[in-house]
Image (cartoon, rainbow, N blue to C red):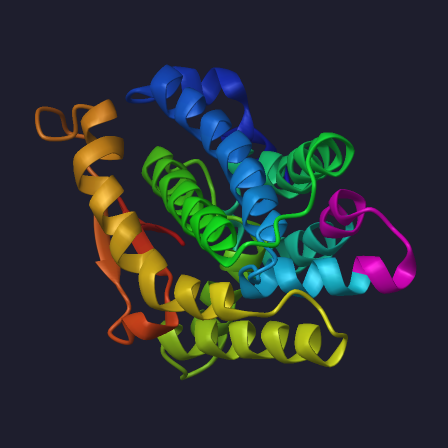
């Protein structure tokens, strides 16, 4: 635990390579991620598997999405801390707490001031905007390399503790989340499929054209190496940064 707290200290991060920029990118990614999920959900076209699961369960229990997601992430964080402390950093904790509440904030604004979209073209545009925002936020979060989101870290733990390749561990967790969300009549739809097919390549685009350039990665020693699933139709990615992994 002392090791985790030491590597999470803002002072330690600030004195690392591009520390200030990395913290700024990580914070922006959390805001964009919550906003992107809210836009995605507002489209009524589905959301990513983990969000779909948490929205489904929180609705059944009568809890806010932000509070329930924080609880689930806290449990996952304990699991990850038990088996792979290297995946945890400041971004892990802020991701755990912040994303759900940012989503709740924007969702409350939509519910108060905007009518639910009914026209298919409008819903499709909102869905695509959600995918793009989520991809950009994921790219910023990955490249900042300040930890792994608790849900993403589970796949790496399963990979390390089993003979199953990471891509199949991630597929397994996504399928379980989607299946439970579907059984609970949660927000599973065409957007969930679009996310699986498209998010990985879009994240790669933002990595090259936005995130790495923010860190001047081509001119400095800090340069993330990005690898995508062989099965990109299932979405997602993993990043290896100096021996550490993020997804």
From the viewer's side, name the closer residue of 67 and 148. 67
Displayed quadrant of residue 35: top right
Q: Is residue 243 visible?
A: no
Seen in the picture, residue 35 relative to 17 is either above or below; the reply is below
From the viewer's side, name the closer residue of 40 and 58. 40
Give the percent coordinates (x, y) of residue 156.
45, 64
Q: Farthest residue in the front direction?
A: 119
Displayed quadrant of residue 176: bottom right
Seen in the picture, residue 199 relative to 30 is either above or below; the reply is below
Name the residue: 18% across, 27% down. 213
Give the percent coordinates (x, y) of residue 188.
60, 69
From the viewer's side, name the closer residue of 181 and 231. 181
Q: Main secondary structure of the magenta part?
A: helix
Decide if residue 213 is on the left or right side of residue 82.
Answer: left
Q: Farthest residue in the right direction?
A: 62
Name the residue: 41% across, 51% down. 128
From the viewer's side, name the closer residue of 78 and 46. 46
Displayed quadrant of residue 59: bottom right
Seen in the picture, residue 93 relative to 239 is either above or below; the reply is above
Q: Is residue 191 visible?
A: yes
Q: Which residues are magenta?
A: 58-70
Q: Pick the quarter of the image with the C terminus.
A: bottom left
- Whether residue 43 appears in magenta in the rendering, the answer is no
Give the percent coordinates (x, y) of residue 157.
50, 66
- Whether residue 68 appears in magenta in the rendering, the answer is yes
Decide if residue 91 is on the left or right side of residue 188.
Answer: left
């Amino acid at each position: 635990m002392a090791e985790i707290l030491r590597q999470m200290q803002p002072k330690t991060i600030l004195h690392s390579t591009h520390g200030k920029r990395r913290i700024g990118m990580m914070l922006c990614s959390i805001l964009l991620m919550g906003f992107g999920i809210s836009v995605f959900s507002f489209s009524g076209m589905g959301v990513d598997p983990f969000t779909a699961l948490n929205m489904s369960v929180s609705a059944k229990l009568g809890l806010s999405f932000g509070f329930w997601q924080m609880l689930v992430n806290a449990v996952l964080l304990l699991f990850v801390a038990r088996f792979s402390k290297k995946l945890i950093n400041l971004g892990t904790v802020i991701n755990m707490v912040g994303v759900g509440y940012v989503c709740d904030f924007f969702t409350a604004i939509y519910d108060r001031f905007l009518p639910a979209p009914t026209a298919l073209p409008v819903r499709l545009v909102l869905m695509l905007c959600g995918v793009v925002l989520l991809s950009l936020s994921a790219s910023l979060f990955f490249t900042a390399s300040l930890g792994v989101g608790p849900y993403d870290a589970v796949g790496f733990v399963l990979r390390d503790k089993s003979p199953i390749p990471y891509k199949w561990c991630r597929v397994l967790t996504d399928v379980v989340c989607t299946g439970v969300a579907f059984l609970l009549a949660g927000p599973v739809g065409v957007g969930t499929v679009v996310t699986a097919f498209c998010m990985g390549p879009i994240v790669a685009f933002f990595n090259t054209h936005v995130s790495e350039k923010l860190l001047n990665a081509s001119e400095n020693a800090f340069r993330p190496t990005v690898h995508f699933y062989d099965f990109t139709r299932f979405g997602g990615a993993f990043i290896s940064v100096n021996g550490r992994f993020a997804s």
